[in-house]
Image (tube, rainbow, N blue to C red):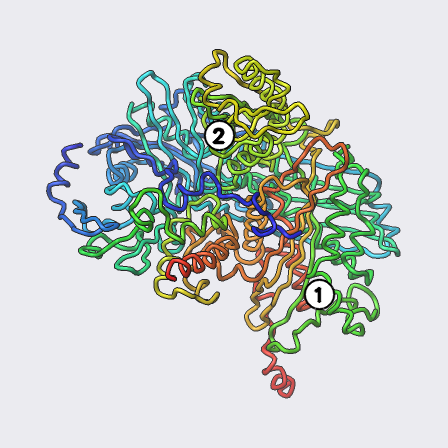
Amino acid sequence: MLLNRKNSGERWRIRPDGPGKVTGAMEYLTDMALPGMLVGLVLRSPYPHAAIRSIHVDQARKQPGVRAVLTHADMPGLNAYGIAIQDQPVLCHDRVRYVGDAVAAVAAETLEQAERALAAIEVDYEQLPVLDSPAKALAEDADLLHPHGNVLHRNAYKTGDVEQAFANCAHIVEETYCTPRQMHTYMETEGGLFVPETDGRLTVYAPTQHGFMDRLQLSRILAMPQGDIRVVSSPIGGSFGGKDELNIQPYGALLAMKTGYPVRIHNSRWESVRAGLKRHPMVITMRTGVDEEGHLIAHQVRVTADTGPYATLGAEVLNFATEHVTGPYQYANVDVESLSVFTNNGMSGEFRGFGGNQAIFALEGQMDRLAECLGMDPWMFRRLNLRAADDPGPFGQPIVRTDGAEQVWRALHDSRLWRERQAAIERKPSIACMPTGNPPTGLRDCYQGNSESKLPWLKEGIGAAYVMHGAGLGVGIPDPAGGRLQLAQDGRIEALFGYEEFGQGLIATLELMLIETFGLAAEDIRIRIGDTDVVPDSGSSTASRATSMMWKAVQNMRMPFMSALLEAAGRLLHRNPGQLHMGRGGIYGRADHGGAEQKLLLPYRALAAATEEPLTAETRFSYPVSPVDRVGAHFLYTYAAVAVKVEVNTLTGRVRVIDQFHTVAAGPVMNPQGYLGQIEGGSSMALGFTLTEDAIMSGGHYVTRNLDTYLVPTIAEQTGQVDVLPIEDLPPGDSHGPRGIGEIGSVGLAPAIAAAVRQAVGKWVCKLPIDPAELQERPYFTQKAVAVHE
Amino acid sequence: MSKEQAAERLTAPVTELHVNGNRVTVCAEPSKRLLHVLRDDLLLTGTKRSCEIGRCGACMVLLDGRPVNACLAMLYQCSGSAVITVEGVAPQKSGELDPIQQAFLEEGGYQCGYCTPGMVISVKALLDFSPEPTDAEIVEALSGNICRCTGYGGILRAVRRAVELRRAERS
């Protein structure tokens, strides 16, 4: 059943955070203000690569209204940050490595005064050769960007012997795929308010996807105990992975502690572009071979990622890409080598999909090309090579068994859009299936739908792609989870989790989970998240993990919490707790024959008032991991398949999406509105990745500086229907519950569009975003004239 | 307040405008952007800052009934004008929502919510002008408002729902 409001019934609910959002009443962290607060600004490098000879701040400090000017010389603690490796300077000392590098930070009474102070800081730079590509950074005589060289990370996965296997292949496809420097483009740029408290503590109101990680990093930088820092990290105006790493927090925190005044920082869009993370541009070369029957027997992959100047999660993204270039298919021989290279380009890092988007775009391109070589239907070709439910994961590691791979294959095969494609091909069998000569030419399907009625330069095609996407941080990375339930003094049932709400609908999902688990009313519940002083550390709100972990936590706490409440209620009511149950508003009695009495015996408020000891339940555990010694290997996977219909205008080269079908096998739908929003919204992000989005750099400088040239889809590009079909079945006895869906919607559309373009106009796309010039044809009405002329 | 700020306050000209039905006077440079006047001087932070070049629509307000990016309007250009921000869309009675806001809630036409105030304003401008818009009119009216979260599906459904709710309200 398609996911929509109508089919969701009462489970389609108004989000608890909705009214504040639609009225503008909800205060984002960048909306906060305090009397007497200062404005913070950061001086960033004008050069992609330079040595710093000297920094003079005397003039800047003398400017009116200036309260602090900080450089590396003023650092109280560690002058470095990074979630995985702390190699990014907070304030650069002797060298800048990209145009976002920070050299000084200023706090002043007004924005204008802060700007004047920035302008008065004198930095003497000596420009150095700019390594603006992995190739330049890997050259033998290249400057070393870090003491250990210009390679952040290498990974590899090998099984069998690909060279020998290639000798036995009937068909081999080799192609190089390039993906863009996609920008998260959260609508709220980085910012926040930093408040030194009278007791010497610091409160940080700034978006992040893991408040406790920010607290840890800030404690190192400020040389303050973690307990003296409170991080309030929610609500957030979009993140998509881009605000997980520290951004402006070190500067706001340092300036606030230095001046003793609250400091507000809010990046301009240009500052966000120059300093912020992007999706890793990757070049992926694949050589893949099949036997006569179409069985995949050899797959060789080389991945090169441009990670920019510092580590952040570049190594982890590369590990993810390495795992996902093989996908849900079985091969006897695999040889993957991958490389993440430091450059003087912009910072690359965590972004929804986490390296899977690039990997799967390339992999699915190979599948379509091979199917064509074989003269096979591309979806049947995938079926032939698809993993069985009990097969190991992409690294040969044990993974949790589900039937997801088969389920989404079947759902797409039976979908309206795919049937439309098959019907259209069969209508013109002579074009579609006639084998002519040697592959790879001559076996291409042609979509013959209703295109006869269209203008001759508009060509339609339908394509599909398959996605198998891991969730959780993977083997070898601490991945804690947990939460707390408690009956508050005022009778509300409080759920406390260390997660952040950046739009994904986590609060609404948790509310619905609590309503359905305990039979509560929404009014009985208070949800508290994103405040390190209040909540337990539940791990990060990343890696499609939060819903799974909240579900598991609620399962773990259900019995202990219910028992605690019912036993306390039993004592007060002089009834056997076994005859009581929780419900809307309070504790109800159970009749002897087992049926529920409708009479409310004890409101939660009365229970709270009459109970001395706290009624609470807490759980701590970790995201489940595969029993394998392979860093980053995943245990839980979500499966998805996407079909898309496009129209290519061969006069302009523009691609328009006109119909989409997404099916996702991720276990039960915890929150229909949130699920639909994640898949629709993820798909829109993939649309931009495929057609228009690229933060273009030249010589280490951003050419793209704002949203006039960085083109995210608007409502005018987001055309046509989007059907979403969730597959909710899990194998009997599955104990892992709902799988992550936060990222997977952003992955499959790109390769599906590429396949549809191939069907429409006969051209293979291997570089994103698709360059319209590649799809332009000589206008048909000039062809005759040219022929005559020639 | 520093001496300089105090001096500025004394010398800055006074501009009068009507915001959400209230007469307000603002002491600020005439070239100050309406966006910053709203957010910093009047503490109306529902109007959001994002691209500041008139591309994304997060700061959309109604200026004498017409949708305007507040990041592109200077204070002097708004002198004597009526400005409606997201805070002024609903009736001023407590707890009541405009049908457009109600429709966004019902259909889930938002996620992070940061573009939502601007969206609500653009939809209001559209429906005040064309109560029964075609899909093409909806697309044109909202093509200056970027949403990064929803993929616009929920927003389109919300606009259609808002049309229904307003129709019911009229009849």
Disc count in the image? 2
Q: Residue at x 61, y 48 (%)?
A: A745
A403 is higher (above) or lower (below) than A261? below
To which quarter of the image does residue A445 belong?
A: bottom right
Q: Chain of mark 1?
A: A
Secondary structure under the numbered disc 1 in the rendered image: helix
- The label shown at residue A580 is none
Q: Position of residue A51 (x, y in %)?
A: 43, 35
Distance (Cα) linking label 1 and label 2: 49 Å
Q: Is A342 in front, or is A740?
A: A740
A288 is higher (above) or lower (below) than A392? below
Q: Is A648 in front, or is B44?
A: B44
User: For the residue marked with disc 2, what is the amino acid?
Assistant: Asp
Disc 2 target residue: A524
- The label shown at residue A420 is 1
Q: Position of residue A719 (x, y in %)?
A: 54, 62
Nearest to the eye among marks 1 and 2: give it. Answer: 2
User: For the residue marked with disc 1, what is the amino acid?
Assistant: Glu
A655 relative position to A637: left or right: left
Pick whichever of labels 1 and 2 is earlier in the sequence.
1
Secondary structure under the numbered disc 2 in the rendered image: helix
A164 relative position to B59: left or right: right
Q: Is A322 in front, or is B95?
A: B95
Q: Position of residue A305 (x, y in %)?
A: 61, 43
Q: Chain of mark 2?
A: A
